[in-house]
Amino acid sequence: MKINLTKLWALPIAVSFSLSAHAEPAKSESVFRNNDTICLIGDSITHSGPYHSYVFLYYATRFPQMRLKFINCGISGDSASGMMGRLQRDVFSNNATVATLSAGMNDVNRGLYSQTKVPEDAENSKRKAIDGFKQNVQKISDSLAEKGVRQVFITPTIYDENFESTVESLRGVNGALGECSDFVIALGKTRSIPVVDFWHPMNEINTKCQQVDPQFTLIGKDRVHPGPMGHLVMAYLFLDQTGAPQDVWSLSIDAKSPKVLEQKNTEATNLAATLAGLTFSNKEFALPFPLIEDAKAAYDLVPFVDRLNRQVLQIRNLATGNYTLKINSTDVGTYSSSDLEKGVNLATNTATPQSNLAQKIASLCKEHQSLGSTIRMLRRVEMKHLGGVDLNDKDAVKAKLEAFIAEMQAKKNDPGANSGYYISTARTYLKESGNEDAMRARILVIEDEIYAINQPQTYFYSLEKSADSQAVLNQ
């Protein structure tokens, strides 16, 4: 995927102003509360994709006093009907206080849209598929409401019909997902349930980018599954539409006095003017959202930094010149007095100690997500391939899966059989099923580690006029 972002952002106003056109206005109160257990119900995009891990990362860095537990309840290839059938095991048994629901990609039955293998009575079957989706989403919502579980609806992501790929484009699938999305949005309004709209803004971003570069895709070669870039866009949409706050913290200081002019989510103390500049201590109640290297192209597609990651330090009335900023004696950069007068966003500075801590949390969140995804793969194999087998009978499980692997290997030349994926999942089960208790224990340790690292800390700041500024002054 390559795109000339300079050309893309010849359209910045159209992109940025229309992203939330179909979303509800942002709410001042978070959709999550302290000690919530959040079960994420979905298909493969939830099962294996990291968008909810990025949401967890945001909350872990932004709200250290709000302890949240995110549980992956996605199953690859599943539909709303299947999700309804596993609510007890996946959601209610985990004592969920919140459930997010994302379905649709499999419900529309993409094979009905093939132009190379046109099914009989396809149009009637398409309508039945969408109607079934609507009925099952309502049933899931009813069941969650009966148990007192707060809900967040999520519309389907897009199906990229236009990206050049060896996978058949199945034209009409994306429109069907759009209809499912409109239904979810309307149902959310009727039931006063928050809705996160992925489909409309993702469709708009994808369309606009492909006008600039026909090879661009927000999704991937299979037309279904977003990569890290797409998932970070999804995390942005989730956070933006659920009213997540912009500021990590903000601090304005008058260097001449010296005194604090304004501060938010931070406490500056021990201000002292020096011959070289200024020093102060700063207790900070949140960390910046770290750079996600493999998803960084997303920052050119949505205003993640401006909307969600502002850690602004403003120093007013400094003598003219350039200043070296140190945090805990670490040189983190040089800024001009005019830039500091306006305010600099330290959230984008990867050299700060705060950024280093945030990256440690990001690594833990990534491991958390990987373990959760593996556990969900175990559930998928049990649900799809081990029905009727006593899971405690290891020999029976092994025999059933080895027979299944042999069956899939015989179909490896059939591109429609998806045999490589099925073989991989079956082998993963045989390898990892005995490690599930250890994986769950590690997840608990990771969560404790995250909430130890993310606690408020006090940092020592110093601003010193840099050597080039001194040279100019001495001339």
Image (cartoon, rainbow, N blue to C red):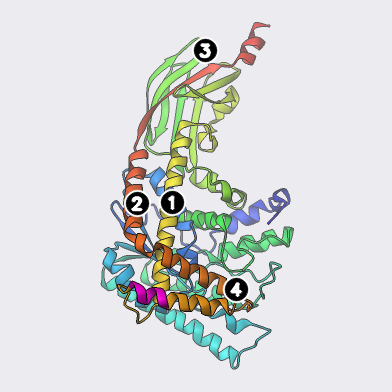
| Nearest to the observer: residue 375 or residue 240 | 375
Amino acid type for the residue under numbered disc 1: Glu
- One can see residue 245 in this view: no
Q: Where is residue 382 shown, x and y percent of the image?
A: 39, 74
Q: Quadrant of the C terminus?
A: top right
Relative horizontal placement of residue 258, taking residue 291 as reference (left or right): left
Residue at image mark 3: 276
- The spot of residue 148 in percent (x, y) is 26, 67
Instruction: Kindly indicate whether the residue at mark 3 contacts the one at mark 2 (C-beta within 8 angstroms).
Output: no
Identify residue type, mark 4.
Asn
Q: Which residue is mark 1?
A: 367
- Examine the structure image and report whether residue 396 is included in the region drawn in magenta: yes
Q: CA distance from mark 1 to mark 4?
A: 32 Å
Q: Earlier in the sequence, mark 2 or mark 1?
A: 1
Q: Which label sits in the foreground, 2 or 3?
A: 2
The residue carrying mark 4 is 174
| Labels 1 and 3: the sequence-earlier one | 3
The residue nearer to you, when weighing 138 against 11, is 138
